[in-house]
Amino acid sequence: MSEALGLAEIVGWSASMVVLDTLEKAAGIRLLQVEFNDLAGAMIKIAGPLGAVCSSLDSGKALAEAMRVRSTIHVIPNPEPAARPGWDAPPEFNPLMEQAVVKAPAAGPAPTQETKGNRMNTQAGFAVGLIETQGFTAIFEAIDTACKTANVEVVAREKLGGGYITVVLKGDVAAVTAAVEAGKAKVDGLGKLIAAHVIPNPTNAVLSLLPK
């Protein structure tokens, strides 16, 4: 593998998605896969030219620190091919979590020189919202409130263990923002709010991890 390998291990699925969005918007990298662990964390694995990977990870680290979420950021400049089976995880389904714990983007065309230098060309025209709680009751109430508040679509539900669960919404920026704000306000007293985020114009890497 001639490209550098970038690693960003983030606590929380919603924070991981926000960091991933920033990684791709910051530089010309590509997502390899995201792998969950049982400590409510997600390992984002990216590849690309060394300079791009380093720049991307610097942006991701700064964002994680600003969000005050625990993260471990690292780059392997010239990964040893023989080590690949150790980090390139095969598909895996966790029966306890009832979902796949290794997520890989769908195959698509290789980035062009234009898209490598301008990640805006790969972005969508809508927003993705994420509400993450510890506890089912809280997330069920939050998502019901969110859907009653604005015209949004529920597109995914992810569990990371430890009682952490994230619901992902889709819609225009104003609707998603209103829905997330209303939903997170309902969590108090029912569970613990872990995070609530809105990603305007999510990148292809983020969209590739959502159900089609």
Image (cartoon, rainbow, N blue to C red):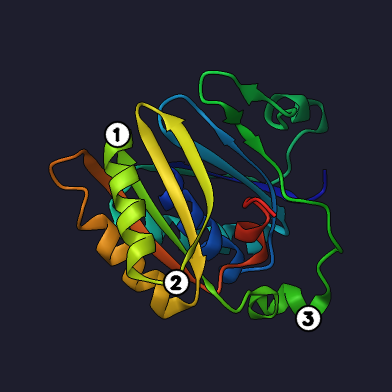
Q: Residue 136's x, y, as percent?
A: 33, 35
In the picture of the structure, the residue carrying the numbered disc 3 is 114
In the picture, the disc for residue 151 is 2
In the picture, the disc for residue 135 is 1
Q: Residue at x 34, y 42 (%)?
A: 70
User: Mark 1 and mark 3: span between their CA atoms?
Assistant: 44 Å
User: Mark 2 and mark 1: span between their CA atoms?
Assistant: 25 Å
Q: Is residue 23 above or below residue 7?
A: below
Label 2 element class: loop
Q: Residue at x 20, y 53 (%)?
A: 186
Q: Is residue 203 above or below residue 161?
A: below
Q: Residue 198's x, y, as percent?
A: 41, 66
Q: Residue at x 36, y 72 (%)?
A: 177
Label 3 element class: helix
Label 1 element class: loop
Q: Residue furthest top?
A: 96
Q: In this orientation, which residue lies closer to the viewer: 154 or 65?
A: 154
Q: Earlier in the sequence, mark 2 or mark 3?
A: 3
Determine whether, in the image, residue 157 is placed left or right of residue 205.
Answer: left
Please state which of the two labelled residues, at mark 2 or mark 1, is closer to the viewer: 2
